[in-house]
Each structure stands twice: as C-alpha cells, then as structure tokens.
Amino acid sequence: MQYLYALEQEAQIFLTSWPRGQEVSSIYVGGGTPTVLVSEELEQVLAVASAFPRASTIEWTVEANPGTLTLDKLRVLKAAGVNRLSLGVQSFDDTILTFLGRTHTGAEAKTAWYNARQVGFDNLSLDLIYAVPGQSLTSWRQTLKEALALAPEHISTYSLMIEEGTEFGRRGLTPVSQELDLAQYEEAQAVLQKAGLCQYEISNFACPGFSCRHNLVYWYNEPYLGLGPSATSYLAGERRTNVRNVSEYVQCLNQGRLPVADRESATPELARAETVILSLRLREGLSRRRFRERFGQDIGDVYSEAIHRLTEYNLVTMDEDSLRLTDKGLPLANQVAMAFLPNNPS
Amino acid sequence: MTSSIAYVRNFCIIAHIDHGKSTLADRMLEQTGAFSAREMQDQVLDQMDLERERGITIKLTPVRLTYQAQDGQEYKYNLIDTPGHVDFSYEVSRSLAACEGALLVVDATQGIEAQTLANAYLALEHDLTIIPVINKIDLPSANPDMAKKEIEEVLGLDPDSAVLCSAKTGQGVSEILEAIARRIPPPQGEVSDPLAALIFDSKFDPYRGVIAYIRVMQGSIKVGQQIRLLATGKDYEVDEVGFFGSDFIPVPELGPGDVGYLSAGIKDIQDARVGDTITDIDRPVAKPLPGYRHLRPMVYCGLYPQEASDYNLLRESLEKLQLNDSALVFELETSAALGFGFRCGFLGLLHMEIVQERLEREFNVHIIATAPNVIYEITTTDGEVLSMDSPAKLPPPNEIESFAEPFVRGTIIVPSEFIGAVMELAQEKRGTYHNMEYLDENRVVITYDLPLSEIIFDFFDLLKSRTRGYASLDYDYLGHRPGDLVKLDILINGEPVDALSLIVHRERARQQGRNLVERLRSLIPRQLFDVPIQAAVGSQIIARETVKALRKDVLAKCYGGDVSRKRKLLEKQKEGKRRMKQVGNVEIPQEAFMAVLKVK
C-alpha cells in the first residue's frame, strides 16, 4: 500500500536527523480509526512508530473503534508495545449510537472492552458523548453507569458540537439547551468523581496516575511531531499542517519532500495566549513558574486587566502557584479564552 | 428663439409605479433620434444604478427632443421625467409647473392606481392638458376598455382622447408624438417682460458648482446677466445657459417657454432650491412664481457608523450626498449606546432607504440606522411649542402638556373584496375613516386619515400582504393633530438605551413594549449574567423579559491537531463580540437596534 510506504518515508526524513539521545515519551496513533486496517497493515503502521527511540516509561496509545477491534488486532497491538487503548464507545444507548451514525452497538463495545482486558491491556480509556439531541439526562446517567461498570482507568466525555460544515450541521439539528448540556456535564463530574476518576481537564477524567500524558503535551503547549495526511506538528514554535489529500501526501514523499501544506509561526504574543488558553483547560491550571520560565514575564503582569475582570466574574482564580478556571469558569472556558486572545488575529 | 415659441412643447410623463413611464420615455427618445444607438441604453433617463435596479425614478432628468410633425413643422419637445414616489411629490409638482401638458400613463392590465390618481389630480390643478396613454396593450391580460372606462369615470377625461400603446414594442408611440404637437398648447410668455424662471431641479457638478434646471416663464436669460434668486435673496452672474441633449448643450440665451439649465457659480445646492424663482437684478418681477415651499424632512432617523473609526467617513459621505440632494439634512447626534453619529432627516421612507443604501454601496460606510420617527410637536407645561425630531430630545414627561403628531390622508385603491382587510388594517393603525368610492364594479378608492408615524413603519408591507399585492397607496400631508402619545423607553440591565426609545400611542404602549422586549430577548446573546430587558413609560415598567446568563460555552475537544482551527474559532467568536455595542456591561448586537422597526 502506497500510503503506508509514504508514511515510512516521512518518518525516515525525521529519523535521519534525529538528535542523539532524544527519546520519545509518548506516542498516539489515532485521528481516524487505525483499527480499520487489517492486521498486517496495522503492524506496518506500528512499525513506523517503533522506529523512533522510545523512553522506557513510554505511554503508547492507539485509538480504536469497538466495531473493528478484533482479538487478532488486539494481539498485534500488544505485541508491538502499545500499552494504552482509547475506545470510541460514545454511548451504551443503541438509539443514540444509531443517531450518531455509529456502526457498533453498546453490547459490541463491551465485548471489545473485555477482549482488550483479556489480551492484557491495563490502561484503557473510553470516549462518551452527551448533549446529543434527544438524549435525556436519564439516558446519559445510564451510559455513565455502564461505563463505570467496566472499571476504566480513563474516561473522556464530549459535549456534541453541532458546527457548520459538519454532518450534524448539514442535518440542521438544533443543539440541546445550554441548561441540559450543563446538567449532563455536571452529572458526569459528580458521578465520575465519586467513582474515583478525577477530572483533570475540561473533558477528561482519570484514576490517579492515569492522566493521558500524550494529551498533556498539547495542553502544556509543548512540542510534538505528527505524521500522516493532515497531521499537525508543533516544532520550534512553528505549527505545521500536512496536506489533507492522501494522493498528494504520497506524491510529495515519493519526490522526497515533506508534505507540509501550512506553516504558521506564532508571534510571542500569540504563543503566550495559546499557552494560557490551553493550560487553562487543565484543572491544575497554568503554572506561574512555568510561564515565567518560558516567557520571562509573570502572567499577572501580562494579563492583569483580563485576570482582574475574569476574577470579578468568578471565572478564574489565581494564587501564588497558578491561574485556574473556577468550577463556574470551566464550562465557560471560551469566554475566558477570548479575554487572552490578542485583538488582531495574526 | 422667441420666434419659434409656437413650436415648443413642454410636457412630462406621469404614472403609477411600474406602469411603464421610463420605457415610454426611452421609446420616444429612440424614435426622435435624440440619442445615437450607442448612447441608447434601456431607460436612459434613470441614471443612478439604484434607480435602474429598483425600476423607479428618483431624480428628474429633462431632455430635449426634435420632432418633425405631420404638419411639416419641426417641434422642440422638452420632456421632463418625474419621480414616481409619494416621497417626492413636491418635486413632481414643480416639474408639472414647468409644463403645459402631461402624458398620463395607465397600465392596461392594472387600470388606475393610487399614484395615477394623485398625479392626475396634481396635473389638473396645474391646468395641464392631459393626454391619457394606455400602455402595455401587447400583454394578453390587457384590458384597454376597462382602463378607458376608468379614465372617463374616475378622472372625467374623454376616453376617446386616450392613445393605445405598447412602450415595449413601440406600437402607438408615433401617435403619442403627434398628439403632443397637436394637443398640448405652446408655452405663453413675452420676451420683453421681466425675467421669471422656475427652478424645478438642481444638481451639483464638481467643476461648475450647482447646475439649476429651469423653465423660463417670461423674459429671457443669457450669459453675463446679473440674476437674483428670490427665496434666498442671493445674487449671481450667469456663466452658462443651455438645454439638455445627451449632455449639456450651451446656447447664448434661453427665452420664454424654454426648458434648460443654468450655471452661475452657485456653490451650495441649498441656494438653488427647487421651486425658487430666478429674476433679473435690475428689472425684477414683482412677486415670485407661485407654489414655492421650503422642503422639510418628514422622517428622521439616527445613522451611526458600525465602527467608531468610520465617523469621519460617514460625515464626508453624507456631505457628498447632500451636494446633490437638498432634501437631505443631518446634524451631529451622540448616543450613549451607539457613540457619535448623525440625526438625519428625509422626505419619506423611500428617500431614507435610498440614502442608507447609497452610503453602504457608493461610499462603503457600514451603518447602523435607528428606527425612523416623524416630527412631533410638543407643548410644554410652560406653553412653549417644540418640534422634536428625536425621541431622545423629549423633555421629561412631567414637563409635557400635550403631544401632536403629523397626519396624512391615505388614498388606497383596492379590489372590493379587500375592503374589509383594508379597513381592519387602517383601524389597527389608528386611522379615521374618511371616504369610500367605487371606481367601477370591482374596485374602490378608500381614504383614511392616518398618523404618519404608523405609515412609516410597516403599513405599506402589511397593506400589500393583506390584499395579495393588489392595493396601491398614496398619501397627502394633512398637518399635525393632537394625540395621546408617550415615550416608550427600553432599559437593558437597568440602563435606559437612548437609541431604542420610541414614541407610541398610550393605549398601545403596553403591547408594543411587550413585543419589543421579546424581540430584544431573542436578539441579545446570553452574557455572563442575567440581563433584564424592560420597557418603561416614565418610571412605570410595562414589560420585562430576561436574557438568561450563559451556562455553557466551551470547546469539547482541543488536541494537537486542532489547536490552530480551534483558536480561529475563538478569534471569530471574539470578533463577533467586538462588533457588538457595549451598553453598560452588556454587549448588544447591531441588529437589536433595528428590532424596533419590526415591532407591531
């Protein structure tokens, strides 16, 4: 398959100039569903990742669709060194799954989960969706209950976003009321917290020690390398996005060129704002010390006016160590984020 | 020139909107060869893009045609086109005063409509010879006999004098040209009498200053002559006179009966007012020509730049528009909600819409327009009478003794099946029944006295929709009449928003207040706190709604692949916030200020 060959070539470009001693601390194979590949192809993809020098403590996650995750593929993943799976369960309510256009059922999701456990995966995450039109608070409660019965190490709960240009946007769906959306959000917070899963990010909950280290890199606004069509990287302060089109991607690499479609170097102002906005997604918030080390200024000085105003509205709180969203601010993070964005988009 | 006065014909074309006035003018230009084929473009007389698009004439553009009549004589025809909208009826009346005859165009498929009636009466008042023209006879649904019958029964004109035509195909146009020579009388006036010329329009030319369009009634006017404008009392020396072809064509002199233009170093269009009389300084006429009236705006609204930084651009654009539009007035206005802008006065709603549209299109200024209002007369408790062009300028309620508002007599022509619907609407709009007459078995003319303030909102739209588009409307100003009016204030988060105030009838204040706060609730986005929206008369709250506080506004996912895209979403959201107007702590979108327009 030409695509997999191109992927290897892209990795090779980076590997040839890889700094001696530099180890990869986390790998995430996802975006789309890698498990649609047949076992042999999956092995090839995993081999690309294994070519990078890995830290002994590596967190290696693969995103999996319950409908395509066979026992055979689970064994391939395990053998390659993958130690974490993220299952796109979405819901255990089959009406909701049908509405979302998912091909698996709640029962199939559970089977996939037990199979993963059986193969020996001891760090499993599942994705759930709420604020789906037609989804009652009761249905959502039931899904949370069934999810907890699987004793997951990690859960992501996403409010359904009906955006222009997406399939749901085209279906002309009316979003659920903010009140119901918030009620379902608070329900998840309460139920998961009680079961020992701590909220560490706006949409993410984990048992102690099981926060997704890979995603923390994004929220700390630290560098990462992305491979594949439309993958993005953040390297030396530059955001790169690869071409979307697969044949274009293959063509670039056949000619020995990097398949980059877009590069954007953030101004220091924008880099600061992004760091604040991304870090605030975390419950631990933005570390004032880390911000100072990175930008040479104190957050309280750079954004004094915004922080003052947001504090008045009880959306953020700041102490000596960090700037954090309050319980009220967490579901209103966009309102907070806008206050930190520079006025003129660069 | 004076020797040929017997072969001059001054006339205009009057019609209801869409009855084919401009198309007929085009055909006449074509058949008399006034324009070369290259210059000929459909509806040459309507020069502005906007006029072309809307299919209506706003500005009068006269033209001279040369016609070889069947009697072997060559005639000079001065065709004066007239605007077809009630907002501009004063200009129509001045154009008529410059003519001896009028072609009254009636659509053979529609018959007489409200403006046909209004214009025909106006022409009769000016003693013009009317040649009825029944147009669009090529259409399958044409009913020339019905049109003839209406011309006879409603207007009292000889139906046999009507010329049948199709301006589209050109059929009948030569008969019309011939009828003008035969039936319309030549102008009167002695060249030896003192100069009296009527200004019936004027335009601004960046190189020559104001160019006045004139009709010489008596005496003559030539280059170098010292003239006086009687209404303004200002004196000038004539630079140039001439007549209208496809361009301005200078001549040494204009004599009695002539229609042409004049330039005399007049800098400001306000100094060459439509209806004013031009005379000679050394040998003036004893009194001005009749009918002059200083044009007063009937409708006012606030115009504000969407971006505060566009204030100067807006001012300059209004100044430029005013160069060619003496009816447009404006003065600085400050709103707590909208910042610096202008209070602008217009002849009517169409005039207002045209100005707003030209600002956006020709000058590229993005504006917020507040709801239009009429001029109210207020008698204070001290007995002083004040004219108010803005609700914001009203004295406090306890200082107001009484209110008076402008009334109009609305003439509505409608098929008889809609009589009930029209009456119901007129009552809703506080109308007082005046009269009803049958035009024929099927159509009636209904007249109601109505407050102008009701007409400037949605009266015409409602009339059209409730009569399936059949009704036509025209109205005449009647003067101010006392009314039980109050100022309706809107408070957002406890603060009165000046730009949202309205003057309404006391009995309807509650209903309008309720409608307005409901609309505002749906237009104002949720904020970080509950935002009460209240309607109040004086200190009494008469309606209230609440925009509930924002509960959830967060991106569910934000991972590596998404950072740029998500940031752009936030930037877009922030830009939307920035475009809103800040009133106290509340962000109000610009559409909210237009909400008042939609209140029933």
Image: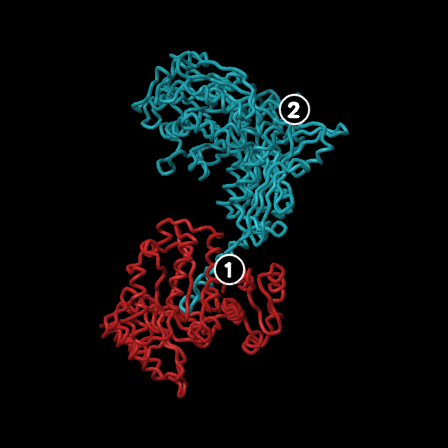
Residue at 52% of width from left, 57% of height from top? B574
Q: Nearer the viewer, residue B468 or A330?
A: A330
Outermost residue, right direction?
B382
- The answer to whether mark 1 and mark 2 are in CB contact below 8 A is no
Residue marked by disc 1: A331
Disc 1 crowd rating (10 Å Cα; few below 14, some 14-19, many 20+) is many
Observer able to see residue B76: no
How many numbered circles does the render carry? 2
Residue A35 in which image quadrant: bottom left
Residue A18, x across and y down, in percent: 37, 84
Which chain is the one coloured cyan? B
Residue marked by disc 2: B482
Query: Mark 1 belongs to which amino acid?
Result: Pro
Q: Chain of mark 2?
A: B
Query: Element at badge 1?
Result: helix
Residue B208, x across and y down, in percent: 56, 40
Query: Element at badge 2?
Result: strand
Residue B293, x across and y down, in percent: 61, 26
**Image position of B306 (left or right of B332):** left
Q: Are marks 1 and 2 on the same chain?
A: no
Query: Mark 2 belongs to which amino acid?
Result: Pro
Residue B516 in which image quadrant: top right
Q: Chain of mark 1?
A: A
Q: Nearer the viewer, residue A78 or B270?
A: A78
Observer able to see residue A259: yes
